[in-house]
Image (tube, coloured by chain):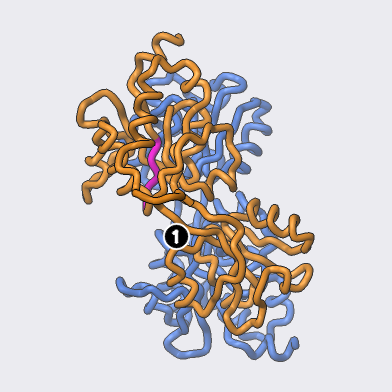
Chain colours: A blue, B orange
Amino acid sequence: MITANQRSPITVALAKGALLKDSVRRFQAAGLDFSDLLEEDNRLLMVPSRCGTARALLVRNADVPVYVAYGQAQLGVVGYDVLREHQLPVAQLVDLSFGGCRMAVAVKASSGYRRAADLPAHCRVASKFTRCAEAFFEQLDLPVELIHLTGSVELGPITGMSEAIVDLVATGRTLRDNGLVAIEDLFTSSARLIGHPLALRLDDGALQGLVERIATVQRPVQVSAR
Amino acid sequence: MITANQRSPITVALAKGALLKDSVRRFQAAGLDFSDLLEEDNRLLMVPSRCGTARALLVRNADVPVYVAYGQAQLGVVGYDVLREHQLPVAQLVDLSFGGCRMAVAVKASSGYRRAADLPAHCRVASKFTRCAEAFFEQLDLPVELIHLTGSVELGPITGMSEAIVDLVATGRTLRDNGLVAIEDLFTSSARLIGHPLALRLDDGALQGLVERIATVQRPVQVSAR
């Protein structure tokens, strides 16, 4: 069984959306070409590398750590925000430095709140990342009512459903367009290479070699990845 | 407060995606025209009706009952599947008969399983609807390990991560394209008009009138809505 696993092709779980292009480029520079995933008309969820020695699974952001945790993919690329929110048993291997954004508390610009501690106790906070938000407000010792949404979180304060939101902010344009302003950061996020712990332990060298190439190739010249 | 609420414009939460076109048509036939939501270049999440007496919130499927439960929308249109999964305190008002589909257990066509009870105990089942799946397998007295995914659930059996999936099936094409077959239905689903219980209780007649028009206009001629 172990031998068969070691010799089977490497499977990589990649996230649809904003991280995909950079993820494919990084693997390409490390020798695995999944650029078929970037074709406009691609409808396949499972794509072999051009060399045929590996395959990529194209899944939603939040599902990347699931496929890696269950060992269906030995490696994956996903935002640190997802790892913080879902806390699955995967190994964090490399900070890939792209997909940078921050998890922030935002409020209506007209609200007068200037930091999270200004929010009234028991106010409502809408978020897609309710576990991250819960931990943050607990640490702040501020009891809030969390409302879980799956998208367009900015509608929370606009409709008056919530005083604040906790959401990812990249350029800040969505906030500005909706009259909102970020008042405090929970943490910064970027894309991470993650691995299945057992697969890494049973590795005959192929996985480790790939991880090292991904860690070193095309690394942007900068002092800190964060 | 109550008087102000009664006189404020009616807000309707509509789901992005497959249900939107029929939802807009149904409200249009009942006298509220939100067809601006159907414009290809629409980016607005909040759209007034053409007559100006109401507004629509465009949100994700799973968020419709949230906005209605919190009273930010007095009415909403959402699939029964979402109502079953999230169990929020909203009133189910009208079965709108469109958006028909079924929640089904599906397996690899090559697996040999012909009904849910054939699945081995403690096997893995992937789903976006893990609460519905949990209730179903509990009722069946079959212990399974549920894996929550947020999309492309059909990859579960394909990659070998799960023996089965529980997912919505409309035409069955996605299953067929992926070599899967539905073996048992949990329930059938269709779009439902839902309401905020307090808003309905405080209604001065405007809401009830709208609900009645939606219930009667353009109802397809058929004996049973299910």
Magenta stretch bounds: B13-17
Q: Is residue B205 above or below residue B196?
A: above
Q: Which residue is mark 1?
A: A98
User: Residue B171, percent across and down?
Assistant: 43, 67
Q: Quadrant of the N terminus of chain A?
A: bottom right
Residue ID at (28%, 39%): B44
Between residues B111 and B92, which one lies in front from this camera angle?
B92
Nearer the observer, B117 or A33: B117
Up-down relation of residue A116 to residue B36 (above or below): above
Quarter holding residue A17: bottom left
Which x, y percent locates residue A71?
A: 66, 73
Residue A67 is at least partly visible in this image: no
Residue A154 screen position, x and y as percent? 41, 36
The residue located at (53%, 55%) in the rendering is: B188
Chain where mark 1 sits: A
Q: Is residue B50 left or right of residue A61?
A: left
Residue type at mark 1? Answer: Phe
Within the magenta stretch, is there residue B48? no
SS of the residue at dot 1? loop
For image coordinates 45% across by 38% down, the residue present is B94
Residue at horizontal 46%, vertical 69%?
Answer: B172
State the image coordinates of residue A174 (x, y, percent, origin top left): 35, 41
The front one of A14 and B184 is B184
10 Å crowding of disc 1: few (<14), some (14-19), many (20+): some
Q: Residue furthest front?
A: B223
Q: Main secondary structure of the magenta part?
A: strand
With B140 as the anchor, is B197 left or right in this view?
A: left
Residue B113 visible? The answer is yes
